[in-house]
Image (cartoon, rainbow, N blue to C red):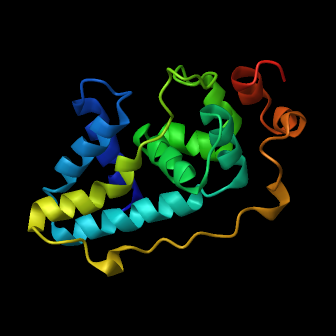
Amino acid sequence: MDTRQFWKLIEDARAQVADPADGEAIAARAAALLSAFPREEIAAAQRVLDSLLAGSYRNSLWAAAFLINGGCGDDGFEYFRGWLIVQGREVFEQSVADPDSLAGLPVIGPPTLDRPWIECEETLYIAMRAYKAATGEELPADAFTIRYPELDAGRDFDFGDRTKMGRRLPRLAALCWPEV
């Protein structure tokens, strides 16, 4: 499985769920679809997922997750990127290139107590669940290849600094922190 095939898997899963805004349903459907593939392809899907997670490990995207969810630690950033993946290739690639573009998605708005966090931990387990369903075994350890790069040092800034966040992510800051 290559990147193009992985995105096709996500697209197919999105098309087959009742609510394409339900990240957990998309991840579950993707795992079910992937379980029909040969075990080598399922393991390759994990490597593609790891590559996407590593490629999106950026300060600017983490800052966007912080604004959108009203805070964001290490795990939360991982789950946020999982949510981005199940939104499909176009949303994922656009948000990695320009995190402020997330302000244009209808689900994004000020973090409130009644709005769920924008995240999908289940995405991280698509290949693991598919492999277990297909083989009855755990995904081999050598399928996991994630190596996070250093965070982009030139983009390091205090996510709680409303002035800097307003300059770096103006649309998201205006949407999520209206007083900025």
Q: Residue at x 33, y 44 (%)?
A: 10
Q: Which residue is drawn at 52% across and 43% down?
A: 92
| Residue 171 position by quadrant | top right
Is the residue 40 above or below the residue 48 in the image? Answer: below
Left/right of residue 151 with respect to residue 157 in the rendered view = left
Direction front: furthest residue: 113
Q: Nearer the viewer, residue 25 or 72?
A: 72
Q: Where is residue 161 in the image (x, y as percent from the top left)?
A: 85, 40
Is the residue 63 above or below the residue 115 in the image? Answer: below
Q: Looking at the figure, which quarter contains the N terminus?
A: bottom left
Q: Which of 15 and 178 is in front in this view?
A: 178
Looking at the image, can residue 166 be seen? yes
Q: Where is residue 49 in the image (x, y as percent from the top left)?
A: 41, 59
Is the residue 6 above or below the residue 116 in the image? Answer: below
Q: Which residue is drawn at 64% across and 70% down?
A: 149
Left/right of residue 165 with respect to residue 141 in the rendered view = right
Left/right of residue 102 with respect to residue 143 in the rendered view = right
